[in-house]
């Protein structure tokens, strides 16, 4: 199907999975609004896309700030007149054990990862209802179902996304708004690489260990997650809502 008349918002679009999602939709013909905290990063991605002859604009925002979210939605509607797909991908991932975590650190993870999803979904749904439908795809993580030491806030926020998405799907199923969640496993992104940056073991060795620890024999690529996101959003996939799609190379299947 064609995406030429569709408008897609992608948060966390300045790199990693978000960058690949923006490229995927734009390459298929959609107009993409790329949102991130750092304007220079999302502008770089938007420029990459426009230089290829596709449509993209960059907008800076704190995704956990209500006024910023309202501004992004309003500017998108002003410029394009509609919002067809909302992809909530922005996230932070500090590794801190529960008893070592301050309330401010906890709140920072929950607001960036989970409250941002609430704010953007609440922001775009009225226009989707007015235009007759739309799709929400929320990027969670395998940490929603199985986690590691030091990820208490992150796993809580990602599990919250799964529950929130199911509730949104049920609230608006009869109004032609679908909502699905994608759970990536280990993916080669700046977030993953930053988690090993300060370790004593050389980065190359750590990344080799990451590859070897995956059932499929390697960690994922951002483009592979972007493909799942597009599948979840596609009108060709019109009977799927409230679903949780795991793309983890078999990680959560392994005992």
Image (cartoon, helix red, strand yellow):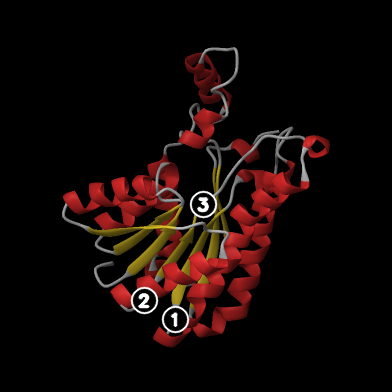
Work out how far the residue at label 2 is from the one at label 3, CA to CA, in angstroms. 21 Å
Residue under circle 3?
90
Label 1, secondary structure: give it: helix
Residue under circle 1?
127
Give the image location of residue 95, x and y in percent. Answer: 67, 34
Question: Which corner quadrant of the image does residue 9 belong to?
Answer: bottom left
> Who is closer to the viewer here, 246 or 200?
200
- Per the rendering, the mark at residue 228 is none
Horizontally, is 112 left or right of 151 in the view? left
Residue at image position (24%, 49%) is 47
Other residues around mark 2 within 10 Å, as few (<14) / some (14–19) / many (≥20): some
Residue under circle 2?
77
The number of numbered badges drawn on the structure is: 3
Which quadrant would the N terminus be assigned to in this image?
bottom left
Label 3, secondary structure: give it: loop
Q: Is residue 159 visible?
A: yes
Work out how far the residue at label 1 is from the one at label 2, CA to CA, in angstroms. 8 Å
Counting residues from the start of the chain, the first of labels 1 and 2 encountered is 2
Work out how far the residue at label 1 is from the one at label 3, CA to CA, in angstroms. 22 Å
Which quadrant would the C terminus be assigned to in this image?
top right
Question: Mark 1 or mark 2, which is nearer to you?
Answer: 2
Counting residues from the start of the chain, the first of labels 1 and 3 encountered is 3
Horizontally, is 168 left or right of 23 in the view? right
Give the image location of residue 82, x and y in percent. Answer: 35, 77
Would you say the residues marked 2 and 3 are in contact, meaning their CB atoms lie under 8 Å apart? no
Horizontally, is 158 left or right of 181 in the view? right
Other residues around mark 1 within 10 Å, as few (<14) / some (14–19) / many (≥20): some
Would you say the residues marked 1 and 2 are in contact, meaning their CB atoms lie under 8 Å apart? yes
Residue at image position (38%, 52%) is 21
Label 2, secondary structure: give it: helix
Counting residues from the start of the chain, the first of labels 2 and 3 encountered is 2
């Amino acid at each position: 199907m064609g995406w030429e008349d569709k408008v897609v918002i992608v948060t966390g679009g300045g790199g990693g999975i978000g960058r690949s999602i923006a490229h995927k939709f734009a390459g298929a013909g959609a107009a993409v609004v790329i949102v991130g905290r750092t304007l220079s990063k999302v502008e770089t991605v938007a420029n990459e896309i426009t230089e290829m002859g596709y449509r993209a604009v960059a907008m800076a925002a704190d995704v956990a700030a209500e006024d910023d979210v309202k501004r992004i939605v309003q500017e998108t509607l002003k410029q394009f007149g509609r919002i067809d797909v909302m992809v909530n991908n922005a996230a932070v991932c500090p590794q801190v054990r529960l008893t070592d975590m301050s309330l401010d650190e906890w709140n920072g993870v929950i607001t960036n990862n989970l409250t941002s999803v609430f704010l953007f979904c609440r922001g775009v749904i009225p226009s989707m209802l007015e235009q007759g439908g739309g799709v929400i795809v929320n990027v969670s993580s395998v940490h929603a179902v199985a986690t590691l030491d030091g990820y208490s806030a992150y796993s809580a926020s990602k599990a919250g996304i799964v529950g929130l998405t199911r509730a949104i799907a049920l609230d608006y199923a009869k109004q032609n708004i679908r909502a699905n969640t994608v759970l990536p496993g280990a993916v080669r992104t700046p977030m993953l690489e930053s988690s090993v940056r300060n370790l004593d073991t050389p980065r190359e060795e750590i990344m080799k260990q990451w590859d070897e620890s995956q059932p499929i024999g390697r960690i994922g690529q951002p483009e592979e997650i972007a493909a799942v996101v597009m599948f979840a959003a596609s009108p060709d996939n019109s009977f799927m809502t409230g679903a949780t799609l795991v793309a983890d190379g078999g990680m959560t299947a392994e005992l």
